[in-house]
Image: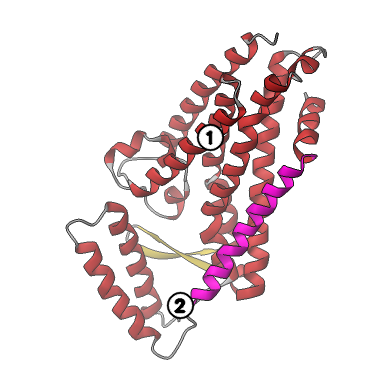
Amino acid sequence: MIALIRNENMKIYKRKRTWVMVAIALLYVLLQIVNLKSTDSHASNDWRIQLEQENVQLSKEAAEPDALKVEVIQAEKHRLLNEYHLDHNIPPGSHGGSFAVDQVRNILFASSLIAIILAGEIMAAEFVSGTIKLLLTRSASRTKIYLSKYFAILQFGLLLSAAAVVVSVLLGGFLFGFDDLFGYTLYVKDQMVHEAPTLLSLVAAYFLNLPFLLIAVTLAFMISAAFRSVTFSIVISLLLSVAGFVLSIAMEGWAWTKYFVFSQTDFTPFFYGNPSVEGVTAGFALVLIALHLAVMHLVSYPMFVKRDVV
C-alpha cells in the first residue's frame, strides 16, 4: 500500500501543471496580503471616532428589513469587536498573525479547488489513457489501488494547504510584523469578545476547516471513478464544490442549512464562536460528514472495482 501511495505521489508531483497550480495557490495568498496592505488604514488620532461611526452604520445595516441573516450575524460580530477596541483603548490595525488566522478558511478553499482538479482526473485519466491496465497487471488489488489514489490526493491537499498557511504567516509577518504571532487574537462567542493565543488559533483554524477539503476531494474522487471523461469530472466537481461553499456562506443562519453538509464543514464556530443554527453540535456535524463520505465511497468504490478496462 505504501509503495502504491508513493507511486501516486510521484505521478502527481512530476507533472509541471501540478507545480503551476501550487504557484497559483501561493500567488493567491500574496494577492490577499497586497489587497489588505493597499486598503489598510493605519491607526490615527481619530480612530475612535471612525469606529463609533462604523458601529452606527453597522447597526443601521443590521436593522434593515431585507438584510440577510449572514449580514446581521457579521455586522453584530464586527460591532462587538469595535466596542472591544474602544473599551480597551486598542487601535485597530493589521498584523501578520491575525491576518493568517483570518485567511485560513479562504486558503483551504483555494487549496481544495486545486486538489479537486487533480482528484477529478486521478481516476478517470487512468481509464482514458489506458494506463489502468498496467496498474492491474501488478499484484495489487483494485481495493489497494483505489485507496492509494484516494490517500495520495488527500495528502497533496493537506500539504498544499499547510504550505499556503505557512506562506501567509511569513509574508504577513514581514509586511505587518510578527508581534501578535505570540500574542492574542480576538473572537466573538456568546455575544462577548474573547482572547485566544494566535498560534493556537492558527493551528485550530487549519484543522477545523479541513472537513471542507475532505468533502470536496472525496466528491471529485467519486465523480472521477464514476465517469470516464476527465473534463466532465473536473468541471462538475468544481461547480458543486464552489456552489456548496458559496451557499454555505450566503445562507448562513437558515434553519435548513443544518442538514446541508457544506454548512457543517467549518468547525471553527463550535470552538471560537457560535453555530449559525441553534442546536447544531460538533457531534452532529461529524456524523453528517461521515454519512456523506460513506455514501460517496459506496458509490465510487463498487464502480471502480466492477468497471471494465477493455
Question: Is label 2 or label 1 in front?
Answer: 1
Quarter of the rendering containing residue 297: top right
User: Up-down: is 32 above or below 83?
Assistant: above
The structure residue drawn at horizontal position 46% and vertical position 35%, both measured from the top left corner, is: 240
Q: Say if the magenta span includes residue 24.
A: yes
Instruction: Mark yes or no: residue 192 visible.
Output: yes
Q: Residues within 10 Å of mark 1 (few under 14, many from 20)?
A: some
Q: Residues within 10 Å of mark 2 (few under 14, many from 20)?
A: some
Quarter of the rendering containing residue 282: top left
Task: Pinpoint residue 117: horizontal percent, then vertical percent.
Answer: 61, 37
Q: What secondary structure is marked by label 1?
A: helix
Q: Please identify the residue farthest to the left as the structure is shown.
A: 65
Q: CA distance from mark 2 to mark 1?
A: 41 Å
User: Up-down: is 282 above or below 28?
Assistant: above
User: Which quadrant, please, contains the N terminus?
Assistant: top right
Image position of 19 (left or right of 242): right
Rendered image: mark on residue 92: 2
Task: Pinpoint residue 263: horizontal percent, then vertical percent.
Answer: 40, 41
The residue range painted magenta reads 14-40
Specify the amino acid type for callout 2.
Pro
Residue sitting nearer the eye, 6 or 189: 6
Q: What secondary structure is marked by label 2?
A: loop
Specify the amino acid type for callout 1.
Val
Image position of 166 (left or right of 112): right
Q: What residue is disc 1 on?
A: 235
